Image: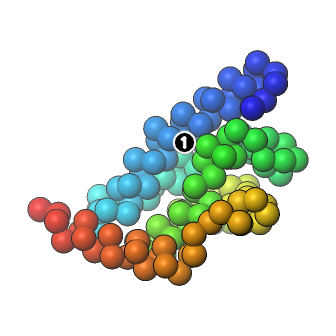
Amino acid sequence: MPKDPYDLAQARFWAKFADDKGTMSLLHVFSKEGEVQQKAVEEAREVFKTLEQALEGKKFFGGNCINYLDLAIGWYAFWLPIIEETANVSMVDDANAPLLKAWLGRFLEVDVIKSILPPRDKTSEMSKIRRNQLLSNMP
C-alpha cells in the first residue's frame, strides 16, 4: 500500500474505477454479441484509456515495483487477452492504450505473478466453453 495519503487515495480511486467500470464492460464484451458487444468494447476502450492516466511515467502503477493497484487490477493482465481472443475483439492495443498494453506484459513477467497463474491454454478453453454457454442462454 502506498505510504503517502494522497497516493493511497489515488490507488483506491483507480482500483474502484477499474472495478466499477472495467469489470462490467468486460463482462458484457464476453457475454454478448453484435451491437451490444460492440458498445461494450467501446466502453471498455474508454475505461482503459482513462485508467492509463494512473500509469503515466511509470513502469507499474506503483512506480518501479508492483503495489496495491497493480494487484487490484492484475487479473486484467491474465484475463484480458483471453477475453479478447474468446470474444474475437481487441480492446487494448498499442493504438488505443499503449501504456496499459505494455503494463500487461510487464506485470505477467513478475516472477511471483508468473508462479501463481493457471495454465493459459486450459483457461482459454474453459473460457470458450463458458462464453458459448452464456450466448446459448441469451433471449
Q: Report whether 48 appears left or right of 56.
A: left
The secondary structure type at the circle numbered 1 is helix
- Mark 1 is surrounded, within 10 Å at the Cα level, by few (under 14), some (14 to 19) or many (20 or more) other residues, namely many
The furthest residue to the top = 5
Colouring method of the image: rainbow
Q: Pick the residue in front: 46 or 30.
A: 30
At 57% from the left and 69% from the top, the residue drawn is: 118
Question: Which image quarter holds the N terminus?
Answer: top right
Question: Which image quarter holds the C terminus?
Answer: bottom left
Q: Pick the residue in front: 39 or 128.
A: 128
Q: Which residue position is annotated with label 1?
A: 18
Whole-percent x, y for residue 130 in the image:
32, 70
Taking the image as drawn, is residue 88 in sight? no
Q: Report whether 49 appears left or right of 124.
A: right
At 40% from the left and 74% from the top, the residue drawn is: 126
82, above or below 110, in the image: below
At 54% from the left and 34% from the top, the residue drawn is: 16
The quadrant holding residue 86 is bottom left
Whole-percent x, y for residue 23 in the image:
45, 48
Whole-percent x, y for residue 65 in the image:
84, 47
36, above or below 67, in the image: below
Amino acid carrying mark 1 in the image? Ala
